[in-house]
Image (cartoon, helix red, strand yellow):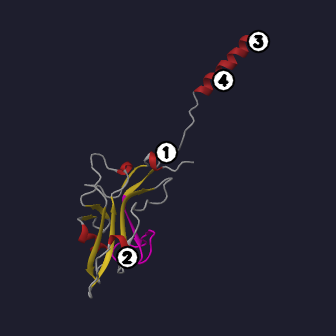
Amino acid sequence: MKKINYLITAIILISTSLVIIPTSSAAEKGYRYWGYFQAAPGKTIWTAAMTGPTVDVADGSVEGWVFTFSGGSVKSAAQPKTAPSFAKICKGVKAEVDTKRVALVIDFGARALKPKGEKIPKSITKCITTAKESVGADILGMALKIRASASGFICGLNGYPAKECGVEIPTPKSLIPKT
């Protein structure tokens, strides 16, 4: 009887050690891309743009772009690290009769999002004086070189990233919220 009990115990131990418990159904993935944010005149907090950069931008606004990520447990794209301060960015720049002033912030994103082999450029803040009818894309194009897809999706700013356009990647561990 003791031999049978030992045999049953051994079988149970061996069979339970072979069971593999999955830690998750699949590796989390999401997309890295250029996120677009805005701050209306007089506002000092970023709001995710609900339209693309083809709409009118008011004098005194701040336009923000950030190379960011969302997907899986990272639901919201990170906003630019630089606060939207029109007064600070456009200090001393006067508007003329037929122009408007728009502050621009370009944040090249977190190190965890850097495409392999690329170098993250320094952030840009600039005051743009432009025609009253200029839209967000015009303002962005006055400050740096834009690479866009055929559909108009912004793929690269000043050559960053060099080739990709809104690619799916595994969620960087440093971006996963701590629970």
Q: Which residues are magenta?
A: 33-54
Residue 153, visible in the rendered structure: yes
Disc 3 and disc 1: Cα gap in Å? 45 Å
Question: Do the CB atoms of the residues marked 3 and 1 lie less than 8 Å apart?
Answer: no
Circle 2 sits in a helix, a strand or a loop, which is it?
loop
Give the side of residue 81 with respect to residue 176, left or right: left
Give the side of residue 131 with respect to residue 55, left or right: left
Disc 2 and disc 4: Cα gap in Å? 68 Å
Disc 1 and disc 4: Cα gap in Å? 29 Å
For disc 4, the marked residue is 12
Residue type highlighted by circle 2: Ser
Circle 1 packing at 10 Å, graded few (<14), some (14-19), many (20+), is: few
Disc 3 and disc 2: Cα gap in Å? 85 Å
Sequence order check, earlier mark of 2 and 4:
4
Q: Quadrant of residue 46?
A: bottom left
Sequence order check, earlier mark of 3 and 4:
3
Q: Which mark is residue 1?
A: 3
Sequence order check, earlier mark of 2 and 1:
1
Disc 3 and disc 4: Cα gap in Å? 17 Å
For disc 1, the marked residue is 26
User: In percent of the image, x 54 and y 40: which residue is there?
Assistant: 23
Compared to residue 6, the image places residue 75 above or below, namely below
User: In percent of the image, x 76 and y 12: which residue is there?
Assistant: 1
Residue 100 lies within the magenta run: no
Residue 135, visible in the rendered structure: no
Q: Nearer the viewer, mark 2 or mark 4?
A: 2
Circle 4 packing at 10 Å, graded few (<14), some (14-19), many (20+), is: few
Circle 2 packing at 10 Å, graded few (<14), some (14-19), many (20+), is: many
Q: Nearer the viewer, mark 3 or mark 2?
A: 2
Residue type highlighted by circle 4: Ile
Q: Which mark is residue 61?
A: 2
